[in-house]
Image: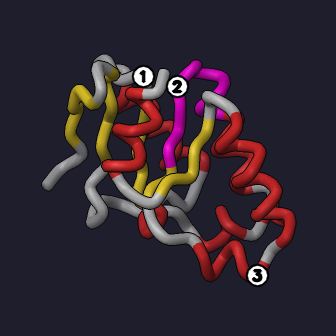
Amino acid sequence: MPDVLQERAGVPVLVCDPDGPAVTTEQDALDLIGAAFLGAEVVAVPASRLDERFFSLGNRFAGEVLQKFANYRLRLVVLGDISRHLEASSALRALVRESNRSRQVWFLPDLDALDARLGAG
């Protein structure tokens, strides 16, 4: 399945294919942002598509990606199980906790959780 624009809980979401191209560079993130300009407010990316560096905060890759989405006023949702990354990094645990309190970036287990968050306002 290709990346597809869907309305979820009344919000246009670009739901990214788990088998799509990996996000390994800032340009890859910008490509997702460009695809979202078809009308999405939220981009839901499977964690499996994110380069391992995204979850190692010391290299700043996650910060660069998150900043790109913020600059273009798009919300980013990372979908899937990231527990092994969370176990390895207290900094990542803090980032996920703070992000999930905001409206800009969420780390969620699946699309059902995304629907619930979007439906909650």
The N terminus appears in which quarter of the rendering?
bottom left
> At which x and y percent is residue 77?
50, 44
Residue sitting at 53 percent across and 30 percent down? Answer: 75
Task: Give the amino acid type for the residue marked by disc 2 in the picture.
Answer: Leu
Q: CA distance from mark 3 to mark 1?
A: 31 Å
How would you rate the neighbour count of disc 2 (Cα within 10 Å): few for under 14, some for 14-19, many for 20 or more? Answer: many
Q: Secondary structure at mark 3?
A: helix
How would you rate the neighbour count of disc 1 (Cα within 10 Å): few for under 14, some for 14-19, many for 20 or more? Answer: some
Q: Are marks 1 and 2 in contact (CB under 8 Å)?
A: yes
Instruction: Nearest to the eye among marks 3 and 2: give it.
Output: 3
Q: Image check: 82 left or right of 85?
A: left
Disc 2 marks which residue?
74
Q: CA distance from mark 3 to mark 2?
A: 28 Å
Task: Give the amino acid type for the residue marked by disc 1 in the picture.
Answer: Glu
Task: Give the amino acid type for the residue marked by disc 3 in the picture.
Answer: Ala
Q: Is residue 38 above or below residue 47?
A: above
Q: Which residues are magenta?
A: 68-77
